[in-house]
């Protein structure tokens, strides 16, 4: 048995990210195949508690304390660092060790392991806190909502689980904008979740597509681009590409936008006609998965009204495979359904939308196979 585990660890140490993820999925499936009834019960029934326990660890600064320590910490050590009661900590640390988030090395002694170190990362804390504080209550309301609506696929963004969970008539984003603590978790997650090195800019032929482009014309319009990180990355990677670079988002985002040299910041609602005419690239990133089909089509029609024959729409989204979707992407799809009556889509689902509005998918460039992150090159038919 030990030899087999050593071989698995050796394989994992030399695997790329996709192979490593596939190995993890295979090992999970093996473990599930060995479960008895009570094993399955114990694994699923207490998932809420795992997230809650990790959130407590964030609040106490526990994972950072363990990761930064020179060796194991006793329960008394943790009590001195956090101010928490020793009786509670003895029970709490024991539970964290039982689910693999920290390591129990001796009686009342605990140390950091790989998961502990992962939990010290800013992106991890922001994401899990966002899920616990905002998405978790929506998951809790999902079964009753689906039962009440006859298990019909939600299509109205103002009649979703969000409105039920939070007793509001507002859109998810409008409601979230009024919750500063929850909004901070969300914004931090969005800011930290993607490394700049994992980008569509590394796979799409920008220079080839912009040969001969006139410098007085707009070359890149980032629609719904937040405070402008994508525009800044575009200018940094392709400073010699001719043409105007324009950031568009709602006024509250534009007010906080980066002042990147060579980038024009413009307030615009993408559900209204596109004011920038004849750009080479109209780009969105992670925008369309927040909206149901009818709103996606409206957004695309607004872009189409501004396009010239040479224009290209670049859509940076998840493009799901037709089978074998991983747990993260499948879960994200149901999360979009609960929050927005929206969805993650496969290439065939994207193509059907494009066809309906007079567009065609020319090519999909996948830049992060693990997460199905891709940029779609879409043009007029």
Image (tube, rainbow, N blue to C red):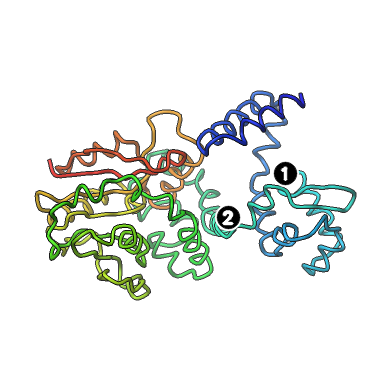
Q: Is residue 154 left or right of residue 280?
A: right
Q: Is residue 221 left or right of residue 133?
A: left
Which one is in front in this view, the residue at disc 1 or the one at disc 2? 2
Image position, residue 271 (x, y; %)? 23, 59
The quarter of the displayed image where residue 277 is located: bottom left
243 and 104: which is toward the camera:
243
Circle 2 residues within 10 Å: few <14, some 14–19, many ≥20: some
Q: Which mark is residue 124?
A: 2
Residue 3 image position (x, y, % from top left) = 75, 25
Count up the numbered dots.
2
Say left or right for 235 vs 10. Answer: left
Name the mark on residue 99: 1
Q: Position of residue 241 (x, y in %)?
A: 22, 58
At x 58%, y 31%, the residue is 23
x and y percent of residue 46 in the render?
A: 68, 43
Residue depicted at x 28% and y 62%? 239
Q: Secondary structure at mark 2?
A: helix
Q: Is residue 197 left or right of residue 89?
A: left
Furthest residue toward bottom: 255
Observer able to see residue 156: no
Residue at 33% x, 49% y: name it.
316
Secondary structure under tag 1 reads loop
Q: Residues within 10 Å of mark 1 (few under 14, many from 20)?
A: few
Q: CA–CA distance between discs 1 and 2?
A: 17 Å
- In the current view of this chain or complex, which residue is farthest to the right? 107
Which of these two is toward me, 113 or 82? Answer: 113
Of callouts 1 and 2, the N-terminal one: 1
Nearest the viewer among 65 and 88 is 65
Residue drawn 71% across the image and 29% down it: 6
């Amino acid at each position: 048995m030990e030899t087999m585990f050593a071989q698995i660890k050796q394989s994992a140490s030399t695997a790329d990210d996709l192979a490593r993820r596939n190995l993890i999925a295979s090992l999970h499936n093996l473990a599930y195949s060995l479960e008895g009834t009570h094993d399955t019960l114990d694994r699923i029934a207490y998932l809420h508690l795992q997230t809650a326990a990790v959130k407590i660890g964030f609040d106490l600064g526990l994972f950072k304390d363990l990761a930064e320590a020179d060796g194991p910490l006793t329960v008394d050590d943790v009590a001195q660092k956090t101010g928490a009661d020793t009786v509670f900590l003895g029970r709490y640390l024991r539970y964290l060790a039982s689910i693999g988030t920290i390591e129990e090395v001796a009686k009342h002694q605990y140390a950091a392991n790989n998961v502990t170190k992962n939990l010290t990362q800013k992106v991890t804390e922001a994401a899990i806190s966002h899920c616990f504080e905002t998405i978790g209550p929506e998951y809790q309301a999902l079964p009753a909502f689906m039962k009440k609506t006859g298990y019909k696929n939600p299509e109205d963004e103002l009649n979703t689980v969000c409105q039920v969970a939070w007793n509001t008539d507002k859109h998810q984003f409008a409601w979230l904008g009024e919750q500063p603590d929850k909004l901070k978790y969300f914004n931090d997650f969005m800011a930290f979740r993607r490394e700049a090195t994992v980008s569509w800019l590394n796979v799409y032929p920008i220079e080839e597509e912009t040969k001969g482009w006139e410098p007085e014309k707009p070359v890149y319009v980032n629609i719904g681009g937040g405070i402008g990180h994508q525009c800044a990355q575009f200018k940094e990677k392709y400073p010699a590409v001719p043409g105007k670079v324009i950031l568009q988002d709602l006024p509250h985002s534009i007010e906080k936008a980066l002042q990147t040299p060579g980038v024009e910041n413009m307030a615009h609602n993408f559900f209204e006609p596109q004011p920038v005419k004849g750009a080479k690239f109209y780009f969105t990133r992670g925008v369309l998965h927040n909206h149901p089909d009818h709103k996606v089509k409206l957004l695309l029609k607004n872009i189409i009204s501004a396009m010239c024959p040479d224009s290209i729409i670049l859509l940076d989204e998840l493009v799901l495979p037709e089978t074998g979707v991983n747990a993260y992407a499948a879960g994200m799809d149901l999360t979009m359904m609960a929050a927005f009556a929206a969805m993650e889509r496969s290439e065939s689902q994207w193509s059907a939308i494009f066809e309906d509005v007079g567009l065609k998918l020319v090519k999909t460039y996948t830049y992060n196979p693990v997460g199905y992150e891709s940029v779609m090159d879409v043009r007029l038919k």
